[in-house]
Image (cartoon, grey):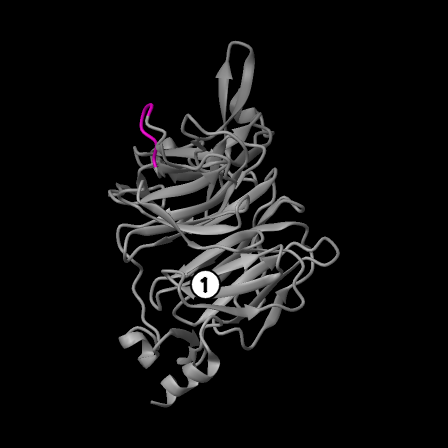
Amino acid sequence: MCNQVNVCHLDADCYDTALGPKCVCRNGFIGDGVSCTAIQDNCLTRPALCDRNAVCSRTSAGDFVCICNPGYRGDGSTCSPLNEKGNYLLFSQGMSIFRVPFYQAGSDRGRRILFKSGGTLVGLAADCKDRQFYYSDISTGTISRASLDNSTDSHVIIADLGSPEGLAVDWISRTLFFTDSALDRIEVSDLEGKYRKVLIDSDLVNPRAITVDPIEGKIYWTDWNRDGPKIEAANTDGTDRQVIVDTGLGLPNGLTFDLYRQQVCWSDAGTQKLECVRPDGSGRSIIYDLANYPFGLATFRDNFYWTDWHKNAIQSIPRGGEVLGASMLFPVGGNGKAYSIEPVASQCLPGTNECTYNNGGCPFLCLPTSNYDSTCACPDNIDQDECNQIFKS
């Protein structure tokens, strides 16, 4: 009877059944036989496309892609195990700072490494070279330093601040940058806090996050001024200041510099987005637009990580922004809001600048600038005439 029926789709076959002829779509097609459409070749229909250490996940666009499991790296079709020994995340929450593994196994969520009674620990930065980390306490207006390997060895290196909220370490030039949203300024010091210099103290309302590109000699910071939020850039000596983003912002809290992709990326609690731009402000792109109240932001290898005031976990997403990664639950013992987040690497990223060798020939602060140049800066707490005499000699 099938040879008398001419209603089947071109991609269907006709079969004689007890109930009469029946059109059936061929393999790779779906439909009622009269109408057949090709099945998209993806991991939903072909699970074998994914590596055994990957899962098939749906993207925000409705596509299905292979994503490597936590602890593995690759394109999803091929995944290889990561060696994360010595690599982890730090984040500040209330009076505490926690250490969290990138991939939480079983009940190991990480642990608290520092507790400061009565403190409000906000800013956080790590020095991969000397294995130190720096944190700010806005309740006392101080910045402290502690060892990554022995956090009980903690001491204040900078005091008399208003509300130090953002910290960034230039591990090449051996300097520390920090914002103060109460004094409305951006400063730099050496890593012992001895030589301090105000870089910018005008046209700032609420400077918060700060990040540094030590190779190109640039700093970037957010200002969450509700009447005009913006993201700015300058050379590390404060020169060549420019606004790179001043539209479509709400409360830009977190900031990070993606050294590999040469992008400035931020988290915004007002727009609920994670976004990136090139250092000159061009090429703006949205990484994720369904965040709740993101605060701190960090990037490590292929992923972004952020804290969120509405989540008791660290959130993550691949650089491509396709599918959310696994949430990293907070360790026990914390309370309050989670602020900054900082990756700690077992090795520093490669790179040099004009201050790499012999501090650039500078007696105090060597601050790299664009075009492979640098500035020997006089600290504010040293007599300027004395400093100039030292430079001349």
Q: x and y percent of residue 224 in the render?
A: 65, 54
The count of marks equals 1
**Residue 292 lies within the magenta run:** no
Estimate the x, y position of residue 77 in percent, counting from the top left: 34, 42
Q: Quadrant of the C terminus?
A: bottom left
Q: Nearer the viewer, residue 90 or 204?
A: 204
Which amino acid type is marked by label 1? Val
Residue at horizontal 31 percent and vertical 75 percent from the top: 359
Q: Residue at x 36, y 60 (%)?
A: 192
Left or right, residue 90 beside residue 137: left
Q: Residue furthest top?
A: 18
Span highlighted in magenta in the image: 103-107
Q: Nearer the viewer, residue 256 or 191?
A: 191
Classify mark 1: helix, strand or loop.
Answer: strand
Quickly name the residue at label 1: 212
Residue 157 visible? The answer is yes
Q: State left or right for residue 153 relative to residue 269.
A: left
